[in-house]
Image (tube, rainbow, N blue to C red):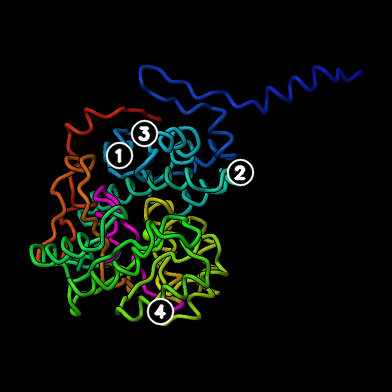
Amino acid sequence: MKVDRRGFLKTLSLLGATVPVTMKQGRVAASEAATRQNNPDGDKAKDRTTGLRIESVETFTRGPVSIVRVRTEDGAEGYGQIAPFNADISATVLHRQIAPSFLGRNPDDLDVLVDRCIEANYKFPWSYVCRAIAGVDTAIWDLRGKREGKSVSELLGGKLRAIPAYGSSMRRDIKPAEEAERLARLRDTKGFRAFKIRIGKVCGHDQDEWPSRTEELVPAVRKAIGNGVSLLVDGNSCYTPRKAIEVGKLLEGNAVCHFEEPCPYWELEWTAEVVAALNVPVAGGEQDNDLAQWRRMIRMRAVDIVQPDICYVGGMTRALRVAAMAAEAGLPCVPHSANLSLVTVFTLHMLAAVPNAGPHVEFSIEPTSWTNDMYQPALEVRDGTVAVPQGPGWGVTINPAWLAAAQPQVSE
Ligand SMILES: [Mg+2]
């Protein structure tokens, strides 16, 4: 039989085509093609699943953030959150590239499902993929907790407790005297016993926000808050190793206990050089979402303190793996949680449970209107500590009015 090359190629292209995800009345139906692409053994694996199955994955996007709701076929549900900022893009990725790996699956297989998502998206490493996975992962942790009547920290073997917070400044536009004054005030009004300040310029090529700001800021803050309060600093990828070591000596002279992201975070060898040269512990990893990269960072001692961000790294499941790698190497874990969305709630539960939890939870001191009415009860600093929310799952309730005002999408 004569092969019709044209017809053969046309058939091939049709088989390989990705059918666009269809949107009907605000609902996203995960296309059969997307399911096949992401779950090569989709239907067969579905049939093997004998437990509860995930029936729908919804996103509620509003402003910079997106809440995720996962429902199982018995009507149980859990809430999670995609990493803030460009969450509308992450929500699109979630429905197109992540939800198909979860729909029809048993939420108890979370570890396997998360890994399958990574493999299904191996051509898209990893930022938006991990931000989207985090939304589904954290919703499933909430669902598991609610099903068992336990908080997530209790599921992880932790205890509900109050965790000391460090007041985290996000500002570089603030003058040293003004920053020193506001931190001393927060020490007195909220009882903070630790603060983090920003030095240098973001990805600053050794430049400061303005000349000598760092050299004035660090001693001014140390003097204002007193020696009994811990001082942490964040370089946000500013320095070359030579300059980072020079700045590090200034930090050591002011009893700084944590030098975060001194060098461009992707330059592991640079940061390792700084770690080797300084006594002040070097922290990092908030941007890192590749677990193999984490393994390398820990092995080569590119950091002394690991800082996975639960929402950037792909959820609680993957953040716990980073913490476990660090524990094996004897390193403490102080997750990155730089805003008061659910990421700080997730982080409190994690810190209450992992054996190598560092001494503080990061707690933003900047007002953010977009987190104000997302969930209840709001987190509060009392006597310098924040309580891990009590109750099943994450221990917080998403405000129905907030959800009603958000842009909904459903994969089912
Ligand atoms: Mg940082």
Rounded to the nearest whole Å, what is the CA distance between mark 2 and mark 4? 42 Å
Percent position of residue 126, x then y: 52, 48
At label 2, counting other C-alpha atoms closer than 10 Å, the crowd grade (few under 14, some 14-19, many 20 or more) is: few
**Looking at the image, how many numbered discs can be counted on the residues?**
4
User: Which structural element holds mark 3?
Assistant: strand
Mark 2–mark 1 CB contact (< 8 Å): no
**Amino acid tagged 3:** Ser
Rounded to the nearest whole Å, what is the CA distance between mark 2 and mark 3? 25 Å
* Residue at the outermost left position: 189
**Amino acid tagged 2:** Lys
Residue on which disc 2 sits: 123
Residue on which disc 1 sits: 67
Residue on which disc 4 sits: 249
Rounded to the nearest whole Å, what is the CA distance between mark 1 and mark 3? 14 Å
At label 3, counting other C-alpha atoms closer than 10 Å, the crowd grade (few under 14, some 14-19, many 20 or more) is: some
Extent of the magenta region = 329-351
Front of the two marks 2 and 3: 2
* Residue at the outermost right position: 2
